[in-house]
Amino acid sequence: MTQYQSKLMQTLTERGFLYQCTDEDGLDKAASEGVVTGYIGFDCTAPSLHVGSLVQIMMLRHLQRAGGRPIVLLGGGTTKIGDPSDKDKSRPILTNELIEKNKNGIKQVFSKFVDFEGSNAAILADNADWLDGLGYIEFLRDVGKLFTVNRMIAMETVKRRLDNEQPMTFLEFNYPLLQSYDFVELYRRHGCTLQLGGSDQWGNITSGIDLSRRMAEADCFGFTTPLITTASGGKMGKTADGAVWLNSDPELGQDYFRTPYEYWQFWRNTDDADVGRFLKLFTDLPLGEIAKLEALEGADINTAKIRLANEATTMLHGAEAAAKAEATARETFEKGGTAVGLPTVEVSGSDLIGMGILAAAVTAGLAASNGEGRRHIKAGALKLNDGKVTSHEQSVSEGDILDGVVKISVGKKKHALLKAV
């Protein structure tokens, strides 16, 4: 691994954030010699961000902790068009009123991760401040002339749509120009020289760097993260129950919030193979401590999962909420469910490890037969430790057994525990 001089590059690479960087040595030098100002844009397509955005938010956190200045850019302007990146079809057009509502919902989260006070205080910006006032003809003359249709068609976002014979509107075709122009404005207003983002943003980021050089003679950098997936191949932040939202405010609507307990449970149910990687990406724990947790095996891996859940929940919702969530989980599992009135079925420990999910449901008394268990799975009703079961081939692993107990549920009201004896 390259030996970096700056704390920023050391942290981002050692913790697994680096996928592509336009100039690693140049960014390392800039970060070691002074304050680097960097930004990430978040379009306002929903009233809450979800865990899928968390890796980007954590990069802003690490940038600030390394002495840099983070800019949270809300896409009040670009949301009116819709980012076509990693999409097979156009996003629905949102009204200005809905965009404003979404903007107010998502901006609450950032103060949990970055500090808006101090010498390198984070900045909250909105690209509507400059995009809404652009004159179309003037924009085409100043910015459009610096883009070729040839280059834009070659961009992965556009190329995929065309190859799949999926329509791309002229509105969406303009998105890279506007995002690139964001970089120019942020450089002029705040001296911003770094754009961070996911790997799907690489084309937009490099276009922004090129435009900043042409329009402002700026020497800028781009840094992207890999696509974060789970060990099972699922998209990070998406579960069978839907997105894992970062907001916990019920006023956002039933589809856009998660309680602190649900959030804690999401991290507690992390796959064994993901624990070490997620501790690096989504917590501030030192790498040495993470290495010890990552080395745990068998049932002991639950210690690492609980630590991950506590650290992640504390960061977002506070230590009290994390402690309460853990206590609720322990009351359910450790006390055999008696404290909360759950029926408990004792099973040989050797039989419980590797037990098929259908057999587990039948043993727990929540399904009369394997056939009924399959129907529960098809309906999305069967859960293992509050995580939705999506395949009848799933089985109980050693890591699923918390303090000797596994929780099986059907729907929201039927629960039982299988206790290893």
Image (tube, rainbow, N blue to C red):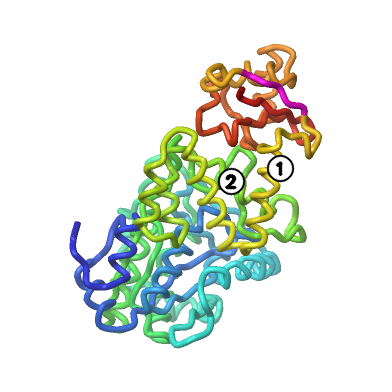
Considering depth in this image, is 412 or 180 the residue closer to the camera? 412
Considering depth in this image, is 260 or 207 the residue closer to the camera? 260
| Label 1 crowd (10 A; few <14 / some 14-19 / many >=20) | some
Prevailing secondary structure of the magenta residues: strand
Mark nearest the camera among 1 and 2 is 1
Magenta residue span: 343-347
In this image, 150 relative to 252: left or right? left
Q: Which residue is drawn at 56% across and 63% down?
A: 315
Residue 400: x %, y % from top left:
55, 32
Residue 334: x %, y % from top left:
66, 38
| Label 2 crowd (10 A; few <14 / some 14-19 / many >=20) | some
Considering depth in this image, is 215 or 264 the residue closer to the camera? 264
Q: Can the viewer see residue 136?
A: yes
Gap in angstroms between the C-alphas marked 1 and 2? 17 Å
Q: Which residue is drawn at 70% across and 12% down?
A: 369
Mark 1 vs 2: CB contact within 8 A: no
Q: Is mark 2 on a helix, strand or loop?
A: helix
Residue 331: x %, y % from top left:
71, 42
- To which quarter of the image does residue 366 belong? top right
Picture layout, residue 215 above or below residue 226: below
- Residue highlighted by disc 1: 331
Picture layout, residue 96 above or below residue 313: below
Amino acid type indicated by mark 1: Glu
- Residue highlighted by disc 2: 266
124 is within the stretch colored magenta: no
